[in-house]
Amino acid sequence: MSIFLYHDWMSLSLPTRNKLANKFGIKKTSSTHVVNNQVESDGYSLRDVEKGLNLPAIKEFLGTEESDMQKLWTMLVDKIEDRVPAVIPPTPEGNVIPITTISQVPIAQAIPDEPIKKKVVKSKK
């Protein structure tokens, strides 16, 4: 793990950090350190986080062979926070995306070729 991930660790919400600490057995070795109403340390040192969130542990938890730590970090946080990563489904042959509802029709295709005739009702005086 590198320093940038510790910064990312500190930018996570407290519940997310607690979930990660619990899942990876990270123990606090110090107390929370606050300066000018900003948390500089939550009690988990860089070594504590590095020890628990190491490359083999994250890869095993995620069940992946990915080795880019930035990608692994994103995948890990998404999983811990129960976020579903955006997956763009492959389009059918010819790059045509099927449209299932009228709201998905582009506006140019939704306008009819012929003008719509309106019935004029005269009022009686």
Image (tube, grey):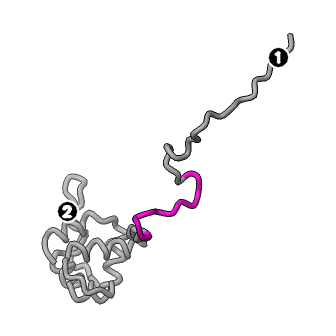
Q: Position of residue 29 (x, y in %)?
A: 21, 79
Is 10 rendered above or below residue 76? above
Give the image quarter of residue 42. bottom left
Q: Which residue is identified by label 2?
A: 40
Q: Which residues are magenta?
A: 92-103
Q: Position of residue 58 (x, y in %)?
A: 27, 84
Q: Give the structural element (helix, strand or loop) at label 2.
A: strand
Q: Position of residue 43 (x, y in %)?
A: 24, 72
Between label 1 and label 2, give the one nearer the viewer.
Answer: 1
* Count of picture labels: 2
* Residue 101 inside the magenta-drawn segment: yes
Q: Residue at x 19, y 70 (%)?
A: 6
Q: Residue at x 86, y 10 (%)?
A: 125
The reply, left or right, for residue 92 in relation to residue 56 is: right
Which residue is farthest right?
124
* Residue 98 inside the magenta-drawn segment: yes
